[in-house]
């Protein structure tokens, strides 16, 4: 068990496409919770997100990677059952590097008209 999270692209009359998968990156969960769901993400309930949201997440990730002291302000960890570590350590920053890489790929491949969802399971 653990915190598994997905950024999905909705495809009408077809199977949704997984764009990004995260495992126990609770700082990413917390960002989506605060910025896209009004602190109300529920287990297994999709949250709509926009390309603008993803650009803002990438902006915050880049800011923290450039200046690690901004981590607690821009991308704070959060605790929860099976959410993983709340330490600001190598794993935390590795998750951000992965997130940066994946967001850059996704933002090159999607349009503003694409319907996107963030989904968390714990």
Image (cartoon, grey):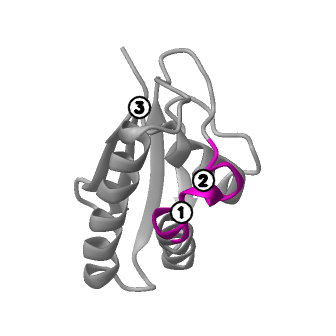
Mark 1 or mark 3, whichever is nearer to me: 1
Tag 1 residue: 64
Spot occupied by residue 80 in the image (x, y as percentages of width and height): 60, 21
Quarter-wise, where is residue 35 in the image? bottom right
Task: Give the mark nearest the N terminus, 3 or 2.
Answer: 3
State the CA–CA distance, disc 3 to disc 2: 17 Å
Considering the numbered disc 2 on the image, is that residue within a helix, a strand or a loop? helix
Magenta region includes residue 80: no
State the CA–CA distance, disc 1 to disc 3: 18 Å
State the CA–CA distance, disc 1 to disc 2: 5 Å
* Mark seen at residue 71: 2
Spot occupied by residue 26 in the image (x, y as percentages of width and height): 51, 37
Q: Is residue 4 left or right of residue 85?
A: left
Check contact, mark 1 vs mark 2: CB within 8 A.
yes
Spot occupied by residue 82 in the image (x, y as percentages of width and height): 48, 17
Q: Is residue 113 left or right of residue 75?
A: left
Tag 3 residue: 24
> Which one is in front, 29 or 18?
29
Check contact, mark 1 vs mark 3: CB within 8 A.
no
Magenta region includes residue 65: yes
Task: Give the mark nearest the N terminus, 1 or 3.
Answer: 3
The residue range painted magenta reads 63-76
Against 28, is 66 above or below? below
> Which one is in front, 59 or 89?
89
Spot occupied by residue 31 in the image (x, y as percentages of width and height): 61, 52
Considering the numbered disc 3 on the image, is that residue within a helix, a strand or a loop? loop
x 62%, y 25%: residue: 79
Furthest-right residue in this view: 38
Q: Is residue 86 left or right of residue 121?
A: right
**Secondary structure mainly formed by the magenta segment:** helix
């Amino acid at each position: 068990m653990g915190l598994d999270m997905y950024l999905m692209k909705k495809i009408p009359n077809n199977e949704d496409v997984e764009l990004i998968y995260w495992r126990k990156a609770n700082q990413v969960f917390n960002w989506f919770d605060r910025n896209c769901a009004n602190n109300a993400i529920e287990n297994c309930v999709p949250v709509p997100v926009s390309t603008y949201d993803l650009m803002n997440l990438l902006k915050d990730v880049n800011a923290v990677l450039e200046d690690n002291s901004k981590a607690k302000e821009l991308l704070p960890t959060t605790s929860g059952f099976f959410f993983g570590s709340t330490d600001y350590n190598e794993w935390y920053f590795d998750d951000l590097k992965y997130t940066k890489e994946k967001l850059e790929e996704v933002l090159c491949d999607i349009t503003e008209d694409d319907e996107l969802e963030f989904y968390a399971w714990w």
